[in-house]
Image (spheres, rainbow, N blue to C red):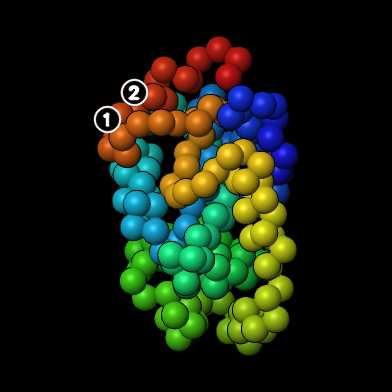
Amino acid sequence: MNPASNNNKLSLSNSDRVRGNMDASIKLLEYGDYQCSQCGQLHRTLQGMVRQISESFCFAFRHFPQTQIHPQSQRAAEAAESAAAQGKFWQMHDTLFEHQQALDDSHLVEYANNLGLDIPQFLKALSEHVYINRVNEDIKSGRDNNVISTPTLFINGDRYIGAWDIESLLAAISGRSGGDR
């Protein structure tokens, strides 16, 4: 998860959690926090965009829990990674954003159960912090790319600075979808 180059440019890696085609002309990368309300809004916006974008695109998510203001965000990131080990990262990812106000351990177990995860395996991974290094790699990558808050979004390797509404994001995407970016 190393940056591709300086100047706020970065690329996706094979270890990223990805929806879509890695060879797509549009690549979105978010550093996010499951307890961050702005990340929740971006999540809903991106879901709406998916329906509007006719060309192929790729979306990647990297964890950037801000535990100093969102105390349950680290645990939620580990829960997402525990679900990933059972092939259900995106299902857990979506569930966590849909229930941002309920990320305590009992709710995480409830979500895992609703997704049909192996609960003993899920609980063991959480209690032993099996995926803490995976989450920390994302945090390090974020820091290496000057991420200081969430959400932080990159479009085709360039940091996005602008409004989080569908129209603004679609305009930014259409301006960056061509060429070698």
Q: Tell me what residue is drawn at x 44 percent, y 80 percent.
A: 104
Q: Which residue, given by chain and number where applicable, does mark 2 sit on? A: 171
Residue in front for this viewpoint, 20 or 122: 122
Whether residue 81 is visible to the viewer of this picture, yes or no, is yes
**Numbered circle sitting on residue 20:** none
Q: Amino acid at mark 2?
A: Ala
Where's residue 29, x and y in %? 53, 40
Q: Tell me what residue is drawn at x 50 percent, y 15 percent.
A: 178
Which quarter shows the C terminus?
A: top right
Q: Is residue 46 above or below residue 71?
A: above
The alpha-carbon separation of the residues under discs 2 and 1 comes to: 6 Å
Where's residue 129, x and y in %? 68, 76
Q: Is residue 27 above or below residue 125?
A: above
Residue in front for this viewpoint, 106 or 47: 106
Which quarter shows the N terminus?
A: top right
Q: Quadrant of residue 110?
A: bottom left
Q: Tell me what residue is drawn at x 54 percent, y 72 percent.
A: 75
Q: Tell me what residue is drawn at x 43 percent, y 65 percent.
A: 69
Q: Amino acid at mark 1?
A: Glu
Residue in front for this viewpoint, 130 or 26: 130
Q: Which residue, given by chain and number where applicable, does mark 1 sit on? A: 167
Q: Secondary structure at mark 1?
A: helix
User: Farthest residue toward the front?
Assistant: 68
Residue in front for this viewpoint, 20 or 7: 7
Horizontally, residue 10 falls left or right of residue 57, namely right
Where's residue 162, x and y in %? 35, 31
